[in-house]
Amino acid sequence: MARVGSGSELAAALFLVLGFPCVMLAAIIPNVWFFAVAVAVTYAADRYLHHCGSYLINRLAAVRAGLSIRFLVRELLLVLLLARMGYGEQTLFYVTVACLLAFYGMQAPQGAMVTLIRLRRKLPVVSRNVDFGPLGIGDAPPRLLMSRPAEKMLHLDLFAVIGVLVAAESGVEAIAYAGLALTLALAVAYLLALLPYVRPSRLVPPEGKILAAVDTWLKSYKPTVVLYFSGSKDSAYQVNMWLETMGQLDGRPLIVLRERAIVPQLASTSVPVLCVPGGVHLMNLDLSTVRVALYAANVGKNIHMLRVPTMKHVFIGHGDSDKLASVNPFSKVYDEVWTAGRAGRDRYALADVGVRDEDIVEVGRPQLATILPWTGTTRNPIPTVLYAPTWEGWDDNPGNTSLLLAGENIVRRLLAAENPVRVLYKPHPFTGTRSRQALAAHLRITALIEEAAAKRTADPRWTAKAAEFQGEQAAARAELVRIEARLAELAGGASNARDEAELSRNSLADPAREAETAKLRDAWNSAYWRSAGWWQHQVVQGSTMRLYDCFNESDAMVSDISSVVSDFIASGKPYAVTDSAGLGAEEFKRQNTAVRAAVILSNEATELDGLLAAVADPAADTLAAERREIKEYLLGPDEPTSIQRFDAAVQALAARAEARNLGVANLGEPVGG
């Protein structure tokens, strides 16, 4: 019911729930030592659950047992303890009650100031690479003051509680007065520390002034092409994959986001970024110079941009696959739909969802330029096989992911292969977000790989290799530290920004910095693989290690029906796809273009030997010719390059938009004008 995420979190939740009855019992008995231990347990459990961000914390607030109430109950029980110990008519009792009431009364001004600061430092438009210097945005308060302020303020009562308990046990009332005074003094100090940041000069300018500054910048910059994106913070990868492409386009690109949570997740770019959460604010921005709007996802908020007739609207998506999402009927609302190759065009024709053939443009996949082609031999003395399953999807279709029915079989067979292989496991970022079964399967697979890695570390065959490459690995680890330090230095003010206002003020465009950052990230990836050892199994999670770097490190891949397969095909390397729904090889191929050159796996994964044989011996690679054919069908020709085709498509559509706008303007001219 509490959705606790770990055994320790569950234990803390139980201690918190059971601790309060114990505190009450100790106060009634009364027993100071019992009371002190029970109170300490509730404090520790409360602190731990807040640190974990436990779901239980929110549930307690929903049933009127929130943070403030829990602290108030503890303080009331402390007063009850004093009364039960015979202090009810003594000065200590009245001073304790008065001080605790005063302390509790200070929560209101503290909460009001924190709320005011947060509201008045929230911008209607958050930016990156846009100069907001003229607005005079001041520094944000230190994180020490603004991070979990209610929890920090309330925990100041600890000194008062300790002082009163020591005094009650020892009879030295001065200790209680000292504890109470310290609590009040620290609370007053907290209020005084916040006070300077409430002054108008430390807050951001009014909303109208900020919006006017944004429009002034837009008039000066005159953006011509916009990448528009809306989604959860977990979907940031969908916009990140297009950042480099946007930076390579002719004209003046702009990225428009709709959710604040996406901004901190955005990868490095020198392209200007505007995050406009409010629909009214977006619709009132001066985007009159924009001629092409690109959409990476089909979401409801797209309508706020789609309503603008002076620009042409294009769905570019965030991957090319045979999933139903690739032929969404919503795509009819766009002026054009851009696909990687002929396969995307044929998909829409077969789906018959209303997207006309003349509105489809084949532009390739510019992101795939970094994927290295296969040389026909393994990169390292033993093959590396990447297992990159997709997530469970929004429904329970067994064909969504191999994780549930086949994942463990795939990993076990790879780990137990007759000739050793290295296994890289890179799950989809959404894995386990909807299905607990998928999350459980992911955790079991992770455990399998980590156990196999531990065994390989202790195996004499591999310890000798580790000793041989010890110097190289140590040098690579040292290089990682150096690169990470330089990356942190380059991130500078943007990464250290304490709120979105500082982020907008500090993150100015610097192409030289971006170029160095990109070079360092490539060097980081190279050093990472060297530091890990070419023989060692790994679970690769998070956004630091890019998927395409895993492609380049691998000699083969096992995956599901998703854009990952289409992208991997660009490498020309052998790959396998799991028929999780049990359609059978022929039907599976008929329904999914990308698997026509794949080793097709059943849920038992017994066919993996064919994939491993193709990697080990080019003569056994019977699907090499089919992979070359399917690559061009899915992704288009190698020449002209994808970025050239993509940019040409942008320019052609911009010209159409300009012609449309001129035509409409001429229709409005008076006769003879």
Image (spheres, helix red, strand yellow):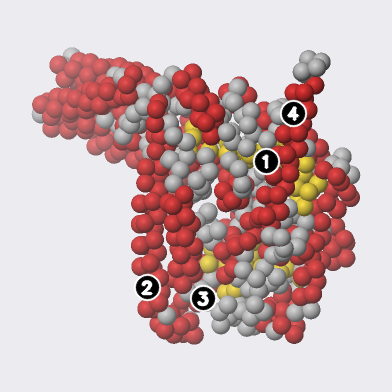
Q: Which mark is residue 662?
A: 4
- Picture coordinates of residue 362 (x, y %)? 77, 52
- Picture coordinates of residue 198 (x, y %)? 32, 21
Residue 632 appears in the picture as rendered? yes
Q: Nearer the viewer, mark 4 or mark 1?
A: 4
Q: Is residue 626 left or right of residue 613?
A: right
Q: Amino acid at mark 1?
A: Leu
Depth order, front residue of 252/158: 252
Query: Which secondary structure lies at badge 3?
Result: loop
Which corner quadrant holds the C terminus?
top right
Q: Does 663 sit above or below residue 229?
A: above
Q: Is residue 7 left or right of residue 89?
A: right
Q: CA distance from mark 1 to mark 2?
A: 43 Å
Q: Which residue is mark 3?
A: 534
Q: Does 488 sit above or below residue 259?
A: below
Q: Is residue 50 left or right of residue 402?
A: left
Q: Amino acid at mark 3?
A: Trp
Residue 561 placement: quadrant: bottom right
Q: Residue at x 82, y 66 (%)?
A: 596
Q: Few, some or many C-alpha atoms within 10 Å of disc 2 (few <14, some 14-19, many ≥20)?
A: some
- Whichever of labels 2 and 3 marks the residue nearer the N terminus, that label is 2
Residue contact between numbered discs 2 and 3, judged by CB atoms under 8 Å: no
Depth order, front residue of 516/34: 516
Q: Does 508 sit above or below residue 614?
A: above
Q: Which mark is residue 294?
A: 1
Q: Amino acid at mark 2?
A: Ala
Q: Nearer the viewer, mark 2 or mark 3?
A: 2
Query: Which secondary structure lies at badge 2?
Result: helix
